[in-house]
Image (tube, rainbow, N blue to C red):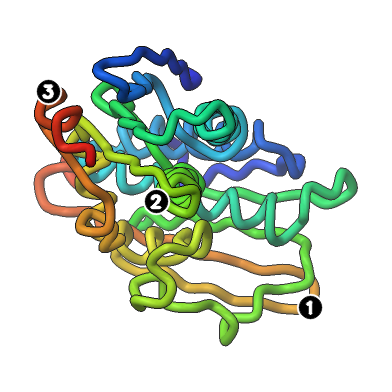
Amino acid sequence: MEQQVSYTLDSTLETVDHAEESATRIATELGFAEDEVMQISMAVREGAVNAVLHGNKYAPDKKVTLAFERTPEDLVITIRDQGPGIDLSGIPNPLAPENLLKTSGRGIFLMRSFMDAVEIRPSQSGTEVKLIKHVRGSSAGNKERS
Amino acid sequence: MSMKLSTRTVDGVTIVDCSGRITLGEGSVTLRDTVRDLLAKGNKKIILNLGDVNYIDSSGIGELVSAFTTTKNQGGELKLLHLTKKVHDLLQITKLYTVFDVKDDEAAAVKGFK
């Protein structure tokens, strides 16, 4: 992977699959372990679902931007939508007993579970989600030196 | 690989053998339709065999929850069978593992219905 790659994608289910496949490929190329690749691809999938479904609401005129950046310490994945901006105060805790049997609301929780850091920045012109996975010792670091 | 389902009956219990991915879109809809169809036909003892499900996302988890609660609300019972490690781990971190009735042995699962 180049230091940075980015894609501008339609607000469709195909975009969700594309985002997941790109994440799997790039994380694998960077030398992350198999379980980490799975975690990264799942987190990206959840971020893309939120962008397409909850942010852009499948609107054909709204795009999703997906960017992968390799820094010396991290793989940083940024997903932006063009929706109204997520209300962070309105996100319930999916682990609370009263929410356990809800059929939705676990996407951000899974992103936070699988990544080392998740930054969510809502604005009136859309939501930006940054997913950060640290590059650890012998895996991705070796690839960088080769 | 998209989701594939097939159903069979053992001692009055419907076993739904699932394979592939339960994710937003086709996979989730297929599972939802199958469970609703079974309940509409009066089949209220259901086992979802997830042994060949290699991927599930938050929408898929939501669909499992929906299948579980819909079945329960209609006086039925739904169990999960043969979780893969990925699905097992996901249900653990979402605290749903203890909510679902999870089994590893098909015969015991069938026998365990009231």
User: What residue is at 66 percent from the left and 69 percent from the top?
Assistant: A127
For the view shown, which residue lies furthest in the bottom direction? A89
Q: Chain of mark 1?
A: A
Q: Residue at horizontal 40%, vertical 21%? A: B20
Query: Which amino acid, mark 1?
Result: Gln
Badge 1: few (under 14), some or many (20 or more) residues near its Cα, within 10 Å? few
Q: In this figure, which residue is indicated by the disc labeled 2? A: A70
In this view, A116 is above or below B104: below
Q: Is residue B20 above or below residue A58?
A: above
Q: Decide which of A40, B52 is in the foreground and name it.
A: B52
Amino acid type indicated by mark 2: Arg
Task: Tell me what residue is drawn at x 50 percent, y 30 percent.
Answer: B42
Question: What residue sits right under mark 1 in the picture?
Answer: A124
Q: Is residue B68 visible?
A: yes
Task: Label 2: state its secondary structure.
Answer: strand
Disc 2, disc 1: CB below 8 Å?
no
The disc label shown at residue B107, or none? 3
Residue B33, quarter of the rendered image: top right
Image coordinates of residue B107 in percent, x first then y, are 12, 23
Tell me the element at label 3: helix
Q: Which of marks 1 and 2 precedes in the sequence?
A: 2
User: Are there few (<14), some (14-19), or many (20+) residues within 10 Å of tag 3?
Assistant: few
Q: Please, which chain is the residue tagged with disc 2 on?
A: A
Above or below, comparing residue A134 to residue B36 in the picture: below
Q: Is residue A18 left or right of residue A111?
A: right
The reply, left or right, for residue A41 in relation to residue A8 is left
